């Protein structure tokens, strides 16, 4: 009986951890590039003059800059922007409003996990109603560029569905997590 309790507790923890939303991370890189030769980097500051970036707080960019610099400094030597490093690092933040079409059926409820089957009643049943939810999709893009050739060598992207009205502390936690998850993929393992 005790084993059953332990098993159910482990199952509950597994189910809850599966429900936590983690960012989706993807990377791409130049397969022939020698990443082992990289020793120094320079982090380029993001310009806040583009249409996409003007709506994002300068404090957000400052936080990203700090986290990227700290994380890469653990593995590589940082040099000044005017010096000659092995590679340059730049980052971009993109916020998009996306649409999530949903349908609601009064007989069955939302999607697969509706209220279950009930006998149809012509007085209470209405055909499925469509609806659209608007949500924010945040993307953090980190690019690595070879300093000599000025060619991109690696790109990491983290995407996450964001809630509206996040306080600045929660935003920074999400950004820190995204930066760490993206940079954990650099350099690529061949």
Image (cartoon, grey):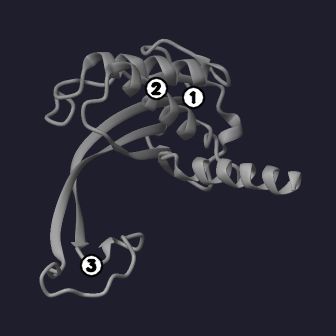
Q: Quadrant of residue 106?
A: bottom left
- What secondary structure is found at the residue carrying circle 3? loop
Instruction: Pinpoint residue 84: horizontal percent, then vertical percent.
Output: 51, 20
Compare marks 1 and 3 and give the one earlier in the sequence.
1
Q: CA distance from mark 1 to mark 2?
A: 30 Å
Which residue lies under the disc numbered 2? 173
Pointers 1 and 3 in contact (C-beta within 8 Å):
no
Left or right of 28, for residue 10: right
Q: Quadrant of residue 8?
A: bottom right
- What secondary structure is found at the residue carrying circle 1? loop
Q: CA distance from mark 2 to mark 3?
A: 41 Å
Residue occupying the point 57% across, 28% down: 86
For the N terminus, give its image quadrant. Answer: bottom right
Between 101 and 152, which is closer to the camera in this rendering? 101
Q: Is residue 25 above or below residue 43?
A: below
Residue occupying the point 44% across, 39% down: 143
Q: CA distance from mark 1 to mark 3?
A: 62 Å
Which residue lies under the disc numbered 1? 86
């Amino acid at each position: 009986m005790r084993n059953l309790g332990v098993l159910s507790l482990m199952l509950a923890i597994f189910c809850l951890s599966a429900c936590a939303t983690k960012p989706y991370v993807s990377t791409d890189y130049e397969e022939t590039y020698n990443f082992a030769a990289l020793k120094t980097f320079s982090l380029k500051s993001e310009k806040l003059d583009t249409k996409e970036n003007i709506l994002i707080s300068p404090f957000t960019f400052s936080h990203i800059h700090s986290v990227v610099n700290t994380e890469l400094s653990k593995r590589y030597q940082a040099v000044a922007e005017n010096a000659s490093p092995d590679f340059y690092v730049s980052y971009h933040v993109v916020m998009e409003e996306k649409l999530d079409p949903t349908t609601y059926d009064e007989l069955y409820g939302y999607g697969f996990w509706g209220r279950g089957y009930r006998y149809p009643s012509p007085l209470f049943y209405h055909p499925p109603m469509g609806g659209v939810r608007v949500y924010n999709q945040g993307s953090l893009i980190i690019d690595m560029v070879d300093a000599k050739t000025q060619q991109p060598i690696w790109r990491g992207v983290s995407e996450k569905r964001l809630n509206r009205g996040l306080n600045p502390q929660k935003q920074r936690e999400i950004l820190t997590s995204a930066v760490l998850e993206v940079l954990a993929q650099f350099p690529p393992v061949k």
